[in-house]
Amino acid sequence: MSDAEGPTTLGTVRFPQVVRSPWWALTRRLLMALGVLSLTVAIIYLDRESYRDNYDEVVDLSDAIYYTTVTLSTTGYGDITPVTQTARLVNAFVITPLRIAFLVLLIGTTLEVLASQGREMFRVARWRRQMDRHVVVVGYGTKGRSAIDMLINNGLSRDDIVVVDPDAAAVQEANNNGLTVVVGDATRRDVLRRAGVGRARQVIITTDRDDSTVLSVLNARQVNRDAYIVAAVREGDNVSLVRQSGADAVVTSSDAVGRLLGLSAVSPALGSVMEDLLSYGEGLEVAERELLVPEVGKQPQQLPDQVIAVVRDNQVHRYFEPGVTQLARGDRLIVVRPAQELPWAPRPGTHGEVTAEDE
């Protein structure tokens, strides 16, 4: 998440459909109305000899402005009138269309602003009512985009993802990618509430600074005691601090990159395999799945999948540990599978398999 703040109002909700501001439309219409006024004044003043003022029979610039305003507004007091055939034709075929355009501009501007604001308020209210058990991603930088791509590739809908970022460029990019964005700083609790963190099932925090990460985790945990919070930190020394702030999982980005670089230097083949596991869509994939009925009572090594860990009672056990030598109901498996077996590898059961927990 960038520290720079763009001109967008903080805390607002931005939807993927990018529309111009109603105030931009209002300013444009007002300028057009002023243009119509100025053009009409010029027409009247240049042909002022064809008009008569019942007060002093002379039409000057102020009279031209006065006649224009009362004519375009359809007030028409009748104290200044066209007296020549040309002036009357100009009023019929030029001033009348300008009057209609002027009224359309004024009425249309009011209706457009009110309708646009009303639609946006209704849309935000409906979005807040429907948003539940979603994923909030704080920061739309490199880490945030990669995390969102992984979520979408594993079956999560874009409609179930909310991005929080104060940077105008990041907001625009996220909107262009079909994501809803709450504009603001995630270190502020009110911004997190606007993003629906209180009803989110997961919060992913990918800020560029560890101090911002700590504050974001603290506020997210205060807003939602049950959400699963994953945070990225730059320095390994801050992992324990972020965990104490309320994060369920902490990833050290600099250490992870450093280890991958070291592995690639020591063993290019091993580095290639690790990169393959971290990528999506080709080669090998790491996935979590439920235990199926025929697999109950078996050893992890006996399954067709390459099991690397077993999740039991919310604890992760390596496949060779004595406590998980026999698989039991309720276990979940961390497996390595070929990418072509997706999409059901991360979420088994979608092809009609009976899981041990369901039975």
Image (tube, rainbow, N blue to C red):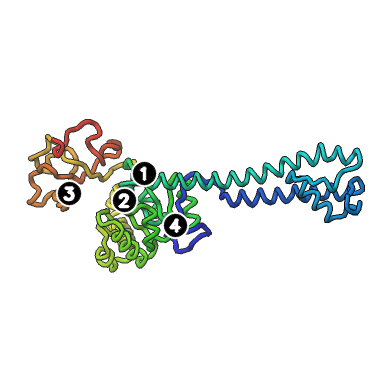
Nearer to us in this view, 289 or 70 = 70
Q: Look at the picture and state if 346 lies above or below 270.
A: above
Q: Are marks 2 and 3 in contact (CB under 8 Å)?
A: no
Q: Which residue is mark 3?
A: 309
Q: Which residue is mark 2?
A: 200
Residue 234 appears anywhere in the view: no
Residue visible at 85% across and 55% down in the picture: 61
How many badges with numbers are in the image?
A: 4
Q: Amino acid at mark 4?
A: Gly
For residue 324, side relative to residue 8 (left or right): left
Q: Which residue is mark 1?
A: 130
x, y percent for residue 63:
84, 53
Q: Amino acid at mark 2?
A: Ala
x, y percent for residue 303:
14, 39
Please rate how many residues cluster around mark 4, counting C-alpha atoms within 10 Å: few if below 14, some from 14 to 19, many from 20.
Answer: many
Nearer to us in this view, 329 or 198 = 198
Q: Look at the picture and state if 233 lies above or below 323.
A: below
* Earlier-in-chain disc, 2 versus 3: 2
The residues bearing labels 2 and 4 have C-alpha atoms spaced at a distance of 17 Å
Residue visible at 67% across and 44% down in the picture: 105
Disc ID at residue 244: none
The residues bearing labels 1 and 4 have C-alpha atoms spaced at a distance of 19 Å
* Earlier-in-chain disc, 1 versus 2: 1
Q: Which residue is mark 4?
A: 11
* Earlier-in-chain disc, 1 versus 4: 4
Q: Look at the picture and state if 303 lies above or below 175.
A: above
Q: Nearer the viewer's eye, disc 1 or disc 2?
A: 1
